[in-house]
Amino acid sequence: MTTFPRTGLPALVLGLVAACGVESPIPAARGELARGRLDRADALLARESDAEAIAIRMQILEMRARRMEVRAELDVLLAPRAGLSRGALLGSLRELLAGEADPVVREWIEQELSRAADRAPMRREPTRDAPNAGGPRPGAVAPALVIAREPRAADATPPADSAARDTPPTDDSSGHSPGDSGGAAAARATAALVARAKELRGELERAGEEGREAAHAELAALAKRNLSAALELAAALESRWAAAAPGLARGATFDALKDLAARRASLDGYRVEALALIRDEETYFYPYEPPAVSFEEVRRYGLAQRAVEQAVAAVRAIWEGTEAVALPPAFGAALREAAWLSEHEHEARGPLAFPDGVPAWIRGLDGALASIGIAEFAWTVDEARALRRSRAVRAFNERQWGALGSGAGGPAVPVAEEREQVRVTNGYRAMMGIPALAWNARLMVAARGHSDFMAETGEMGHFEPEPARHSPFDRMSRAGYAAGAGENVHSGFVLAHLAHESWIQSSQHHRSLLNEDFQEMASARSGWYWTQDFGRDDAFLKELHGWRD
């Protein structure tokens, strides 16, 4: 069982109170700590996320764990099988009280002193100097005056705020007082739980990648019931972190990843520039052809389009010209360990910080991959999660198409070039740092119908004469898709990548290709005519659960 020296507690209490002084961002916790109300103080501190608040909360955790241990010691001391005489018990309790500074623990001891005093009338315990009728008893203690009195009102009626004071968690719900056999049983159960937590800490510290989940799950369950177990869990996680983190900053793999990070930083700069130009509707305006605009505006649009093309070319040069970094098995395992520990960082006693020389972006690297290229590099855990989602979306598209077969089988079944057009669109979005779009069969029906209309009539545009199919949104709704969001059309090229090149020459079509609000799409071709339909429905996300790249 972990012990906390009583001599260190007053300084700890004073340190906690001082840390919550007037200058602190959490002064409301000061009074609660001064009165020993750790639960209330902890609730106030939980609203803050700075390092000071976290450090104080961990000290509170240790104080609460110590209170549990003191309570367990009292339970053992007061148990009938301890065999202490009343005088010896009173002497031990007074000794505990004299060295105690925690106000809650002092109250517990004072209550036990009061109960012990109330159990007998006023008398003197037999001593060697004043033997009783039966003669001196071996091991008799020094004189101790015990005064019988009526119970105080405070003993019968607890203070109004006593419910808010910290009481140790216990597995015993029978209502036994600390001095009876139920209290002793609870103390033994607590001691066994803490001993098991220590064993699990060792198991978790030694466990490999395959065994860590089982050890963690059992220890985390104990940590929810016992504060000492929570400290053991925190120590185990911190030990694993100390073993794993330094190994990520050594070797040729780390050097190659640093070079990749530098390339990614350059890519980010070019992406920002390109997207700013593409989304600037005043400079990169629409429409841009006569008679809707003047010849001077046509000239200005040409300059804007050239600037966009140059910015996109700079992005593409890094995107396509950066080699991937192969991850050796040991390095990949270290990345996975760091990622796993980051997921459980809230169970540690504070942030799990990398040592000097290890950049924070290491957390964003996916150790499950055999290699990391510019497309897989992530600065943060959140970005890594977004990249995994896009990979899962692309895999989802391929699974859907695989289930449909390769031949034409109706308006909802895309042929090879139509599937390729979706891949081209998602590839372009990935290059620009925008999530992938899921293919949707209902959007496919709407897009197919409009491409057929344009091929049959020779009229390229977004509107049809039939009222029920007049606008893109009418057609999507008729196909059973209620979250339609946009449409691109094209005439002239049969191949998917050439249709794409045409769209990125047109400002509004270019913006549609890169719209971050869109979630789904489909592309359909009939003759020379292409239609892309986009939607915002994200119901497909539930289909991604459990899928891997």
Image (spheres, helix red, strand yellow):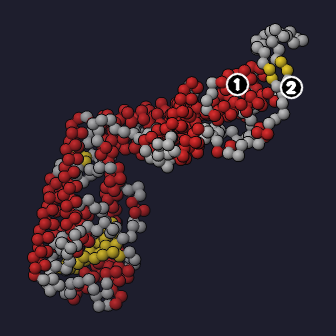
Residue at the image position 35 percent from the left and 53 percent from the top: 382
In the structure shown, which secondary structural element does the residue marked by tag 2 occupy?
loop
Amino acid type shown at disc 2: Pro
In the structure shown, which secondary structural element does the residue marked by tag 1 occupy?
helix
Residue that mark 2 sits on: 121
Q: Do callouts 2 and 1 mark residues in contact (Cβ within 8 Å)? A: no
Q: Is residue 101 left or right of residue 353?
A: right
Q: Quadrant of the N terminus?
A: top right
Residue at the image position 31 percent from the left and 66 percent from the top: 516
Please state the horizontal and vertical placement of residue 137, each as a whole percent of the image. 81, 11
Q: Quadrant of residue 421?
A: bottom left
Q: Quadrant of residue 80?
A: top right
Residue at the image position 71 percent from the left and 46 percent from the top: 160
Residue at the image position 68 percent from the left and 34 percent from the top: 107
Amino acid type shown at disc 1: Leu
- Categorize mark 2 by other alpha carbons within 10 Å: few (<14), some (14-19), many (20+): few
Q: Quadrant of residue 192?
A: top right
- Between 406 and 115, the one nearer to me in the picture: 115
Q: Quadrant of the C terminus?
A: bottom left
Give the distance between the C-alpha atoms of the residues marked 2 and 1, in whole angstroms: 19 Å
Measured along the vertical axis of the image, is residue 470 above or below residue 143? below
Please state the horizontal and vertical placement of residue 303, each as a whole percent of the image. 11, 71
Tell which residue pokes out farthest to the front in this image: 22
Label disc, if present, on residue 93 of the rendered structure: 1
Please state the horizontal and vertical placement of residue 511, each as a whole percent of the image. 24, 70
